[in-house]
Image (cartoon, coloured by chain):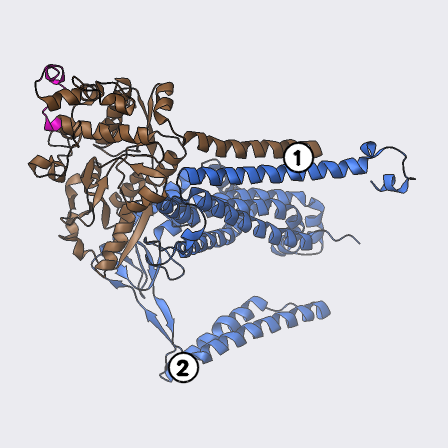
Chain colours: A brown, B blue
Amino acid sequence: MKKTIATLAVGLGVALAGATLGAGSASAQATLANVKQKGFLQCGANTGLAGFGVPDAQGNWSGFDVDYCRAVAAAVFGDPTKVRFTPLAAKDRFTALQSGEVDVLIRNTTVTMSRDTALGLHFTGVNYYDGQGFMVRKKLGVSSAKELNGASICTQQGTTTELNLADYFRANNMKYEVVAFASSDETFKAYDSGRCDAFTTDASGLYAERLRASAPDDHIVLPEVISKEPLGPGVRKGDGQWADIVTWVGYALVNAEELGVTKANVDQMMKSDNPEVKRLLGVEGSFGEGIGLTKDWAARIVKGVGNYGEIFERNIGEGSRLKIKRGLNALWSKGGLQYGMPIR
Amino acid sequence: MSTIASRPPAKASLVNDPKVRGIVYQVVLVAVLVALVWAAATNAIDNLRAAKIASGFGFLESTSGFDIGQTLIPYSATSTYGRAFLVGLLNTLLVAAIGIVLATFLGFVVGVARLSSNWIVARVATVYVELIRNLPLLLQLLFWYIAVLRALPEPRASLNAGIGVFLNNRGLYMPRPIVAPDSWLLMASLAIGVVAAIAYSVHARRKQAATGEQSPTGRAALGFVVGLPLLVWLLLALLGTNPISFELPQQTRFNLNGGLQVFPEFVALTLGLTIYTAAFIAEIVRAGILAVSRGQTEAANALGLRSGPTLKLVVIPQAMRVIIPPLTSQYLNLTKNSSLAVVIGYPDLVQVFMGTVLNQTGQAIECVAITMAVYLTISIVTATVMNDYNRRKALVER
C-alpha cells in the first residue's frame, strides 16, 4: 500500500513538473526554429466565422485571417499550405497561445492595452479595423442602438464585445439583459431561436453571421458602431524575431498592394525598375535575412496568397458573399488606415 | 503493530526495525511530495514571470466591466471580479440545491414505481430510466434548452396565466411580493405558526407513543404555518393597511419588466440535471428496496399495515441504509455536472469565472485553482453531511 502511494505521488509530481516545464520550454525564444523543425505553422484560428476563418466539409480552411496564416507559412517555408489550424473559442485563445499550443494567433482578436501588457502576448499590428455593432430583427421596428433599452442581448463571453456592451449601456443609462455563450455558434443559435432581441459582435462578424440565419433578410444591422476594434495577429511575448516576422508579413502584404504587386504579376514584377518593388521582392538588398528568412520572402508571400487587397476581396470584399466595403481598411492613399511601413 | 510492541524489545539494528523503517518511509514520502509541489509551484511562477504574464490574486479586487444575466446578489459591470465569482458560485449552489431536492423526489417516485405491481406504471418507469440514463447529459441539456426556447412564444405574444404570471421565451415572470416595513404583525404570525406547528408535532408524537392514536400533523402544520399568516393578512387588508403589495411584470418594448423572472437557461439546466440524475437515483432506490428481505413486508402485512404505511414505515427506513452511500455520489455528480451550464449560457461558476474572468484577466492558473478548490469544498461538505446522516441511519448494534 505504502508503495502504491509512493508511486502515485511520484507520478503526480512528475506530471505536475512536466506540465509546468512544458509550458516553459514552449514559451522560450526561437519559435522560428521550432516551426521550421516541425515543418508546419500551427495557427490559432476561429472556430468558424464566415469570410474570416472557417473550414469546409473537407476540412480545408479559408478566410481572411486564414490567408494571413498562410502568408506567414509562405514566408517561412515558401509554401502557403504548410500550416495547421487550431480552432479556438474566444475564451480559450490566449491560453492556447501562452501555453505554446499555437505559434501565432490570427483570429479576429482586438488589440487592447491589457491584453498586450498583462497576458504575455504581443500584437504585431492590425490586419482589420473593425467596430462593434448590433443586429436585430426587422419586425421589432428598431432603427438605432439607442432604442435598445430593456432588450435581451446575446453575446460571446471572454470578448471585448462583452465589455463594450456593458460600457455602452451604462454610458447611455439604459438597461439590458445579457445572455453570454462560450462559442459564437451557440451565441448566434440562441439569437436566431428568439432568446435575444439583439445580437452583438464586431460589424464584420455581424455580416458573416447573418448569412447563417434561418432567414437572413429578416435581420438588419443597426447603424451605430459603438467601439474601436482593431483586429490583429498576436504572438507570445519575448521572442523578438518571431514577432518581427509576423509584423513584417503584414506590412509586406500591404506594401505589395500599394506597389501593385499581385499574385498574377509577381514574376514579371521581379524585373521591375521601381527600387521599392525591387527591395520588396528581394531583387535588391537582403531584408528577409534580417528576420531569419530568405531574400525573396515577400515574393513567396505574394505568390502564395496575393497582396492585402486580393486577400480582402477574395474573402470578405465585393467579390465574396459578405460584400464588406474596404472603408477603414482601404490603403492610406485611398482614405483608409492600412499603411505598409517602408521596406528599406 | 500491537503484537510487535508487546513482544520484548528486539535486538535487531535500527535498519531492520519495522517501526523505524515505517517512520522513515513516511518522512521520505512527505519530503518528496513537498519538494515536488514546491518545485512545480516555483517553476510555474518563474515561467509566468518569464512570459510576462501577470500573476497573483490581486485581480479579484479589480473592476470586472462585464454584466451577468442572472444574479442573486446585487452586481453590475462596476463590481469586482471577486463579486462576479460570488455571483457565479451562488448560481451554481442554487441550481445544485434545487436539482438535488427535485432529483431525490423524482428518483424515489420512479424507483418505487419500477417495483409497482401495476404493469403500466412499472413499464413507464423502466422506459424512463433506460432512456434517460443511456443518453449523454450534454445532449439532454441542449435538447431541453432548444426545446424550451422553441416551444415558447416571443415576449410580445406571452402566454398569460392571469394574476400577473407570464410565460415566453425569455422566461417565466411572476409578481414580486414587496413586504412593507411595518408588517411586523405578519412576520410575528408566521413565527407563531412555525412554533405552534413544531409544538403540535411533538405533542402528537408523545400522544402516539402513549396511546397509539395518530394525529393529522401534516394538515395541522399547513394550517399553522400558512393559514395563520394568511388570516392575519386578510384581517390587516380588511382594516385597510395592506402589508404586502405585488410588483407586476410590465410589458415594455422588448421584454416584460419587473416582477420575478425565472430564466430559460436556469429552467433548462435544472430540468436536465433533475431528470438525468433522477434516473440513477431511481435505480439506487430500487436496489435499496429489493435489499430489504421480503419477510419484512410480509410481517408488516400480517400485522395489518396497508401497503402505503408498509413502504413508509418498514421498507424505506431499512432500505435507506443501502441507499444513502450511492445517493451521496449522485448528489456530488449532480453538483459537478452543473458545470455543463457553460453550453447553454447559464452563468454558473465555470461559465462566469473560468470563462469570462479567466479570459479578461488571462490568469488561468489562479482561476482554475480557485474553481477546483470551490468544487472540492462543495463536494466535501456534501459528502460530510451525507456521511453524518448515514451514521445516524446505520444499523445500531447493541
Q: Secondary structure at mark 2?
A: helix
Residue at the far right: name it. B8
Viewer-nearest residue: B350 or B191:
B350
User: What's the amino acid at mark 1?
Assistant: Ile
| Picture quadrant of residue A169 | bottom left
Tell me, yes or no, if residue B182 can be seen here.
yes
Per the image, the residue denoted by label 1 is: A5
Q: Are marks 2 and 1 on the same chain?
A: no
Query: Looking at the picture, how far across and down is residue B323, in whole percent?
Result: 62, 47
Query: Chief secondary structure of the magenta span?
Result: loop
Please, what is the three-letter code of the amino acid marked with disc 2? Leu
Secondary element type, mark 1:
helix
- Residue drawn at (80%, 38%) of the image: B19
In the displayed structure, B333 sits above or below B75; it is above
Q: Residues within 10 Å of mark 2 (few under 14, many from 20)?
A: some
Residue B167 higher or lower than B126, as above or below: below
Place of residue B50 in the rendered image (x, y in percent of width and height, measured from the top left)? 42, 37
Residue at position x 68%, y 46% from top? B292
On whether residue B324 falls in the magenta region, the answer is: no
Q: Position of residue B252 (x, y in %)?
A: 22, 61
Q: Mark 2 near mark 1, Cβ–Cβ under 8 Å?
A: no
| Magenta stretch holds residue A260 | yes
The answer to whether residue A56 of the structure is visible from this angle is: no
Q: Is residue B313 left or right of residue A100?
A: right
Image quarter (top left, top right, bottom left or bottom right) of the N terminus of chain B: top right
On residue A136, the disc is none
Chain under disc 1: A
Residue range in magenta is A257-272
- Horizontally, residue A217 falls left or right of residue A197, namely left
Identify residue for label 2.
B236
| Number of numbered discs on residues | 2
> Mark 2 or mark 1: which is in front?
1
